[in-house]
Image (cartoon, rainbow, N blue to C red):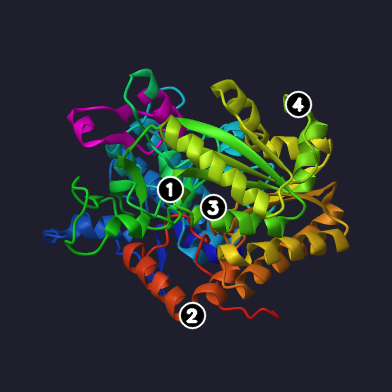
Amino acid sequence: MSTSMFRPLGRWLTTRPGNIRNLATGGPSFPRRPPPSSSGSSAPPPPNAKILAFARYSPWSSSFPGSWRTRALLQSAFYAVGIVLATNYVDSVWFPAGAETGYASPREIKVAIEKLKQAFPEEDRVSTDSNVLTEHGSSDNSYHPASPHAVVVRALSTEDVVTIKVTILGYLQGASASTCRPWTRFSKYMADSDLICQAGAQWEDINQTLKDKGIPLFFPLDPGPGATIGGMVGTGCSGTNAVRYGTAKAEWFLNLTVVLPNGEVIKTRRRARKSSAGFDTTKLFIGAEGTLGIVTEATLRLAPRLPTKVAMAQFGNVEQAVNAVQDILNSPYGSHIQCVELLDDRMMDAINTAGVSTKLLPVRDTLFFKLQGDDPAIKLTAKTVQAIVKKHGSDRFEFASTDQEAEDLWQNRKYALTSTMGAHPGTRCWTTDVCVPVSKLPELVYETKKDLAEAGLRSTIVGHVGDGNFHALILFENDDELPKVTDAVHRLVHRALDLDGTCTGEHGVGIGKKQYLSEELGEGTVELMRSIKNAVDPLNLLNPGKLYPDKSKSRTQ
């Protein structure tokens, strides 16, 4: 900051009573008016003489006509204005990002945090603790660019979210921008097999509460353990049950309560099971990854809880397994298949090595089934499945006849990720997913396993084979191997797109896969998405940098 800007101020402050310089123009000095003669009578002062006297002399001049209180007040005001101007200047020089992006400067963020603490004075409602910020703002299993949060605010209601006036990227295990304490409300709506809950409620807690209350219903969407309703909405989740019950983009969310970026609260529709009134704005927010609004409440449609058994079949290769699934789902008993999960031979080896299974299983490409229905239906379905998998080359079929046997058998699928990590101590894991038409899945899995082996990367594969969706769990030891893993993921995504698939079946786009949207959806569709974002959130307050591609990039770029 140049000192020359203070020189005129210095000259003004040190002006002697007899010589007032025209500082604005740099012109000549103006002599003081001589005092009136004591011998003669003087003319009465003009009406505005006192005002002119205040304007003529600075508060630091000995000729200033005001009292010492007035002098001190004016001096203090001058210093205050000077401090504010100097602080803004320093902010603009040292922290230019806020001015360039339109977001708050570090000083403004500190002020906003103090206001949040005043609005939510309860303990742990507003936190800037570094450990809390790290816990809520990063993941050890994410390898994409990230920036730390400034604050975590725990909102407990829709009204709390409205009160929060600063942009925060909070923690809802998915995409929403605030944290809601899990809360589930059961009411008269139970007669209609639906349920109202807050966005922070976890699907497992909901289902366990229903079971504990003796209510023979459940919420069938089942992504990873601990997933919350708000995050499931944001990512458009699915899970192992999708082969029978579909994904979040089916009718499992009857309506949503959403706080828009401008603070307005909307409810997307009424509680009726179906409606043809206007746009389906509920689905506008499903898969939007928190970029259009903050979901605070949802009405969930529930399904009857049916008896379930587990079966397992092993094959010589993935193609045999997938082809068997196609025939099973198209059979008269296909509607009784709740889940069909593929674990490749390397995954089975990892399960055996990690020691989480109750018994060792042959290292083969394996299908795990969940069968639903009453006892006669399950038995007929099991016989049908056994006959079809045998026709497609399966040499081992197991059916769990008791609940304990079913639990023991299914835990092999349940602990796939932890088994992969446990079988290779000290390694890190990049998990990614793609989805293709089911008939293309054998080709995709074969080419992917071949590519990863040629790249010298260890991996396991687990897939929701009934949907054509699979997850690759790629292991590496240090940052030196990370570029090789990144390149392998890019090749996997492009391989899926070439097979008329998608870059993500259920994980979502976020930062890591937004570059593929233009190739997958086309520029016209992506531009429509941007237009909706700009209309709803013109200031780009919610989850900036997520979902929407920065610009169109070709595959060669």
Mark 2 Cα within 10 Å, few/some/many (few <14, many 20+)? some
Is residue 192 found inside the magenta-colored segment of the image?
yes
Question: Mark 3 or mark 2, which is nearer to you?
Answer: 3
Q: Give me the disc on residue 335.
A: 1
User: Which of pointers 4 and 3 lies earlier in the amino acid sequence?
Assistant: 3
According to the picture, the residue beneath numbered tag 2 turns out to be 523
* Disc sitting over residue 136 in the figure: none
On the image, the x and y values in percent for residue 1 come to 60, 62
Q: Position of residue 284 (x, y in %)?
A: 34, 60
Task: Kindly report the distance in space between the C-alpha atoms of the residues bearing marks 2 and 4.
Answer: 51 Å
Q: Quadrant of residue 7?
A: bottom right
Q: Residue at x 38, y 18 (%)?
A: 212
| The quadrant where residue 499 appears | bottom right
Residue range highlighted in magenta = 181-210
| Residue position marked by numbered label 3 in the rendering | 328
For mark 4, does the 10 Å Cα neighbourhood hold few (<14), some (14 to 19), or many (20 or more) residues?
Answer: few
Q: Nearer the viewer, mark 1 or mark 2?
A: 1
Which SS class for mark 1? helix
Q: Is residue 304 left or right of residue 289?
A: left
Q: Residues within 10 Å of mark 3 (few under 14, many from 20)?
A: many
Residue at 57% in and 68% down: 501
| Residue matched to label 4 | 359
Nearest to N terminus: mark 3 or mark 2? 3
In the image, taking residue 530 as reference, residue 553 lies left or right, namely right
Q: Amino acid at mark 1?
A: Ser
